[in-house]
Image (cartoon, rainbow, N blue to C red):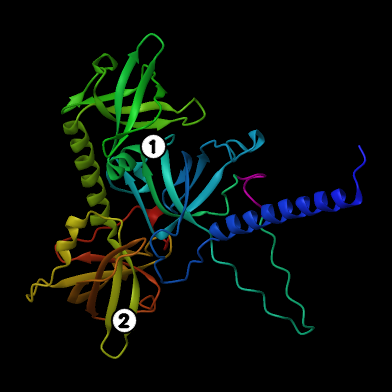
Amino acid sequence: MNYSPRLQVQHGLRVVLVLFACFALHLSAFAAETPFQLKPGEFPPNGTPHYVDGELVALDHVNRTGVLRPDRTDAQRRGDWDLPHPFTLLPFGSLHYRGAAAELRDIPIGTHLHGWFYQPPAPPKEPLDAKGKRAVAKTVVPKYERLGLDAAYSLAARLEDDFSFSAREQRVWRVDAVDLEKFTLTTTGLTAGKADAKTTTFQLVPGTRVWRGRGFGELKDLAAGQSVFLNLTYATLKGPGRCTDIWLDAESRTLATAQQAEVHRQSLRERGFAGWIDTVDNQQAIVTVTLFNAFDPKLRELFRVTNTTNDTIVAATAEDSLRTWDQINDRKRGTLLEAKEVPAATGSSGLQVKFKVELLIEGFRPKRIIRLWPSAWKIDDLPREERLYQ
């Protein structure tokens, strides 16, 4: 069909306007996704991390690294499904398992996790050589040929299992129907009492663990009307996911959280509280540290100043992986001078402590990582693989 020149011009203008609108939407979407730039020794503001959820498929608990298999979403092409998402826990990065603080070693392979991530800071530019050219950076061979769409967000600020996510979000699953012949569990999600628009059907297997009261239950204990917590595996790979654990009541959930809290407390006793150094007064040998938030808030009382001879503290330098060199021989004792609240941010406990150390060593510098033990705790040795000094 032939159009008049005037109609052709009008049609062309419409096309241009549509393309411009699409371009503007693309720019606005890009601006909304512009990643927050981390700065050494500074906690990022709340609300700045990027969310990625997936299944833990590999981990190195000593170096605090791992790999997620991200959940499948409509934003992915089929060929991009299940590509690996390697991550490293930030020094202030925290984990939660069964509603309590945890270490990477506590979380079983196959656990579905909710994660909040940042991109690494841009590397510094190589200096110019004598001819005014930049040196060619060494090529780093990637561990995987292809990575997930969100792989640029590789620094984890927080990871938590479905149990912890549900507890924090006040979310439970109401059991609508159980079919033990087809091994399915039909539920409705309730967040702060508000029901989801649609039901969700999860897979069961004979090995699904059921927790009831102070002990084990069975799949046959599942009944319509119950409000349960779930931990999943194969999320989005096998429909919404397969249940690894189901907690039937409040008592079983409370016990699970209490048990994990004790596991993590033991880890802190042996490895110390982690934080980074804010300031150092070299003349007075006074070090100020803000503790990371990866611990039970009840333990803040251990740093309370009593103005007695018990106000002592022990410190050991650490690396970004939170590993110390040799805490038995490198530790330095000091006097706790102050413990105060500071504005909380992502990764920060909001607790800042100040102590006068008996001897300033090289590692006691601003923005460096440090481990602290309150006077009530005895410092023990660590397994060889956890020490930086071999």
In the rendered image, the residue lying farthest to the right is 2
**Quarter in which the C terminus is drawn:** bottom left
378 is within the stretch colored magenta: no
- Vertical position of residue 90 compared to residue 7: above or below: below
Q: Give the magenta range.
A: 141-147
Residue 55 screen position, x and y as percent: 46, 37
Q: Nearer the viewer, residue 362 or 102?
A: 102
The residue labelled by disc 1 is 108
The amino acid beneath tag 1 is Pro
Residue 309 screen position, x and y as percent: 8, 75
Q: CA distance from mark 2 to mark 1?
A: 40 Å
Residue 266 screen position, x and y as percent: 23, 50
Q: Which mark is residue 360?
A: 2
For label 1, the SS is loop
- The residue at the point 21 percent across, 46 percent down is 262
- Vertical position of residue 315 compared to residue 160: above or below: below
Q: Nearer the viewer, residue 97 or 313?
A: 97
Label 2 crowding class (10 Å Cα cut-off): few <14, some 14-19, many 20+? some
- Vertical position of residue 131 compared to residue 291: above or below: below
**Quarter in which the N terminus is drawn:** top right
